Image: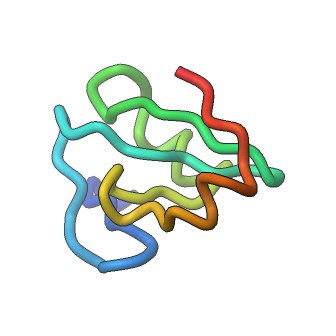
Amino acid sequence: MDDVLRCRRCGDVIGVYEPLIVRTGGRARETSRAAEDHDEARLHGDCYHRGCFEPRERDQASLQS
C-alpha cells in the first residue's frame, strides 16, 4: 500500500508528525500518523490537515482528542 497519506481537501501530503483530523461516521478526532498506523486511519475515514478541516465540519462533528 502507498505510504503517502493525502489531505482529502487540499490533496497535499500529510506529514508523519503533523496533526491531522480523521472523520468517520459523522465524528472527527485529532491524531497524527506518528501516533497511530496511518493506513488504518485512511481505511476507516477521511483524513485532513488540521487547518484544512472545514469550520462547518468542526461544528457538525464532535472533535475528540
Q: Residue at (67%, 54%) from the top-left corner?
A: 59
Colouring rule applied to residues: rainbow
Where residue 4 appears, as percent x and y from the top left, is 26, 60
Of 25 and 53, the residue lying toward us = 53
Of 15 and 21, the residue lying toward us = 21
Please, which residue is most extreme toward the right here?
25
Q: Residue at (41%, 40%) from the top-left corner?
A: 38
Q: In the rendered image of this protein, does residue 4 appear above or below residue 50?
A: below
Where residue 51 appears, as percent x and y from the top left, is 30, 57
40 left or right of 15? right
Q: In the rendered image of this protein, does residue 34 appear above or below residue 56?
A: above
Q: Which image quadrant is residue 33 in?
A: top left
Where residue 26 appears, as percent x and y from the top left, is 80, 53
Q: Residue at (51%, 62%) from the top-left corner?
A: 55
Q: Residue at (17%, 47%) from the top-left corner?
A: 15
Of 39 and 53, the residue lying toward us = 53
3 left or right of 26? left
